[in-house]
Image (cartoon, rainbow, N blue to C red):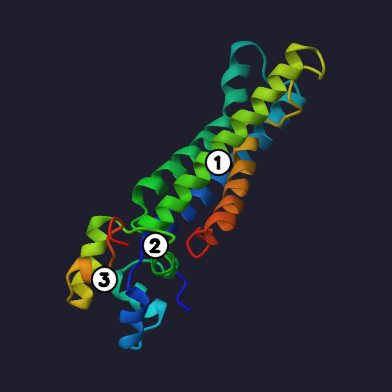
Amino acid sequence: MNNRLKVLRAERNWSQSDLAERLAVSRQSVNAIETGKYDPSLPLAFRIAELFALPIEDIFTSPTKG
Amino acid sequence: MTRYKSPAMRRYVVRMAVLMTIYLTTLLAAVYAFRHDLVSGLAAYPLAILPALPIIGVFWAVMRLLVEEPDEFIRMLMVRQSLVATGFCLTITTIWEFLQNFDLVKDGNGGFGAAFFWFVGLGVGALFNWWTLRATGSDCA
C-alpha cells in the first residue's frame, strides 16, 4: 500500500530508528511499511496517524484509489 | 542503528538456552545408560523419550514467541518462517517415506528425524523471507 510515511518522517528529520522507537516497533517494520512491503494492521495504522496528528487517509493511499 | 529486541525475544533466548541444556544433559545420560546396558524392559521407554521432551519444549518456545512477540511485522516474518519450515519438513519426510516404501533406501533415518528437518526448514524460511522481503527478522531473531 502506497503511503507518505517516508516524507512525513523526513519532514521531522527523524531516522527510521527514531520513528520505530516512537511507535514501539522494530526498524525493520518501519522500513517494510515505508517501502510498501508490509501493510500495517488497523491498530498500528491508527498509532501512526496519531503520532503524525493526521487522518489515516492522509498517510496511506487506499488501494482502490491508488 | 537501534537493534530491536523485545522482552518476548529475550524470554525466547532464555527458554532456548534452558531447553538446550536439558536436551544435552538428558541425551548424554540416555546414551550412557543404553551403551552400558543400565536400563532394560519398561524402564527403557521413558529414558528413550526423555531427550525428546526438551525438543518438544523448543516447539513450545517457538509457538510462545509467535504469541508473545508484540511487533506485528516481525511476528509475520516468524509465522512465514515456521510455515516454510513445516512445509520443508513434511516434504522431506514424505519423500523419504515413499523411497522407503519402494525399498530404494534403508529403513530408519540415521538419527535425522522430523525435528531436525524442521529446524533446517527454519533456516530455509529465513532465506525465503530475505529473498521475498529483504528482511529476516534478524534484528529480533
Instruction: Name above or below for residue B94 compared with residue A42.
Output: above
Q: In the depicted view, which residue is nearer to us: B60 or B72? A: B72
Find numbered disc 1 in the image and state the secondary structure of the residue it sits on.
helix
Please tell me which residue is depicted at 57% across the width and 30% down the height of the picture: B52
Classify residue A25 by image quadrant.
bottom left
- Pointer 2 chain: B
Q: Are marks 3 and 1 on the same chain?
A: no
Find numbered disc 2 in the image and state the secondary structure of the residue it sits on.
loop
Q: Which mark is residue B84?
A: 1
Q: Which residue is mark 3?
A: A59
Q: In the depicted view, which residue is nearer to us: A2 or B18? A: A2
Residues under numbered marks 2 and 3 in contact, where contact means CB atoms less than 8 Å apart: no
Inter-mark Cα distance, 2 to 3: 27 Å
Please tell me which residue is depicted at 71% across the width and 17% down the height of the picture: B98
Q: Which residue is mark 2?
A: B6
Q: Which mark is residue A19?
A: none
Q: Nearer the viewer, mark 2 or mark 3?
A: 3
- Pointer 3 chain: A
